[in-house]
Structures are given as structure tokens and as C-alpha cells.
Amino acid sequence: MSAIIRTKDLQKYYNPGEELEVRALDGVTIEIERGEFTAIVGPSGSGKTTLLNIIGGLDHQTGGTAHIGDTEITAMNDNQLIDFRLKNIGFVFQAYNLIPVLTAEENVEFIMLLQNRPKEERHARALELLKAVGLESKMNNRPSEMSGGQQQRVAVARALASKPQFVLADEPTANLDSQSTADLLDIMAELNKKENVTFLFSTHDQRVIDRARRIITLEDGKIISDERIERR
């Protein structure tokens, strides 16, 4: 396997040098290999979401570096980050973040529309992904016509639409009931196993942790443990 994500001495300080300085990340060095199914865990305020946001190009670091493949994402300006995210990174958020006026199919197609993909290609890819997440029958439904679990599955399909290098999932099960969580994790695990999709989660959810094959624990912005687990 080859490292798809690498961070070195990554730092994110708020109010640096002041009395109320907060070290959200304090020297985080990790490597994530292609095809991993990794959970970043730790108490609230430990730096989980901050780490994902910097890796995903949604926030800027105070110090250190983050590379996606051979690209140093932490050296990019905002316009470069927008283009890089669009082509390389899939996101799944706690709040689903679907566009209310669009159907499931249109939500999945949206990233490809921004990439100027042909209509036929967008439709075929959206249909393929909605089938993969078990929502082919909901392709013409808007978010308000779907359950929370169904909306999050659409969000997973959307995250995969552009065939990104990896998917960042920030507390993706936080608003889901037990059955919806199990269904979502089954789908993600299947995509990981069969299509080698790389998933990096931040989570408090023990149900996610129990499925991860690597668990990185943060506390006060530092890695305190990094464990690989064999799963059947």
C-alpha cells in the first residue's frame, strides 16, 4: 500500500502566543494508506474535526504540513484548494448537507456538474451510486421525502461521485438511529472492501469504532495511540 494522506508536525493554534492560546492540533504526524478504514477518536475538543478540516482543505494550519499523494495541500491558496477538493476529496458531514430543492439523483450529480461532466456520464454515475447505496427507487425524491438514514446514504453516493482519492466522514452517524447507522456502515465497509475506497472518520460513535480497522486517538491535539485491528 502507498500513503495517500501524510501529515507532519501538523499544528493549529487559536490565539497563538496569547494567554488564552488553544492548541487544537499540537504536532500531529500520521500516514493513511490507500484502502484504509480509519477512525479518529477522542473527547470533544481533542482536535478530530480540525484534523479532518485541514486534510480536506477546509481550514489552514498554523504550522506543519499535510500532503495528499504528492501534493502539499497546506501550501495551497483558497482558489487552489477549491479546485483540488472538487477533484480529489469526498466529504460526508453530520448534517447531510444535501441541497433541499434537488432530487437524490441531482444531489449526487451536483459535484460532476461543477466538473463540467457530460449529462449522460452524470446520470449513469449517479444511477450506479444510488444502486450501490440501495436508493435507486428514491432517485427522484427530494431530501424532505427521505429519512435521515436515506439522506446520509445519498451523501455517501455524492461523496463518491467524482471518484475521489478518499472520503472524509465527520461524525456521519451522529444523527442516525441504530438501524440506519448499521445500514450506512455496511455500505461504507462494502465500498471499502470491494472498491478499495479509503475512508477516514472522525467519530464519538462506538458503532463506527467497532467497524474501523485502524483507530487513532487524539487528546488535547496530540496522538496518544494508533492501533491497527484485524477485522473479519
Image (cartoon, helix red, strand yellow):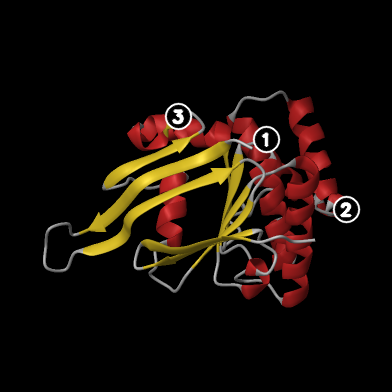
Please tell me which residue is depicted at 36% across the width and 32% down the height of the picture: 76
- Image position of 214 (left or right of 83): right
Q: Residues within 10 Å of mark 1 (few under 14, many from 20)?
A: some
Does label 2 or label 3 sit earlier along the sequence? Answer: 3
- Image position of 163 (left or right of 114): right
Between the C-alphas of marks 2 and 1, the distance is: 23 Å
Residue depth check, mark 2 versus mark 3: number of the one nearer the observer: 3
Q: Where is mark 3, residue-wise?
A: 71
User: Up-down: is 112 above or below 203?
Assistant: above
Does label 2 or label 1 sit earlier along the sequence? Answer: 2
Disc 2 secondary structure class? helix
Does label 1 or label 3 sit earlier along the sequence? Answer: 3
Number of numbered discs visible in the structure rendering? 3
Q: Residues within 10 Å of mark 2 (few under 14, many from 20)?
A: few
Q: Position of residue 27 (x, y in %)?
A: 32, 53
Disc 2 marks a residue whose amino acid type is Ser
Residue depth check, mark 2 versus mark 1: number of the one nearer the observer: 1
Q: Position of residue 147 (x, y in %)?
A: 74, 67
Q: Where is mark 2, residue-wise?
A: 137
Disc number for residue 135: none
Disc 1 secondary structure class? loop
Q: Position of residue 14 (x, y in %)?
A: 23, 59
Please tell me which residue is depicted at 55% across the width and 72% down the height of the picture: 204
Quarter holding the C terminus is bottom right
User: Up-down: is 194 above or below 22?
Assistant: above
Q: Where is mark 1, residue-wise?
A: 163
Residue 128 or 146: which is nearer the viewer? 128
Q: Residues within 10 Å of mark 3 (few under 14, many from 20)?
A: some
Q: Residue furthest right?
A: 137
Residue 38 or 14: which is nearer the viewer? 38
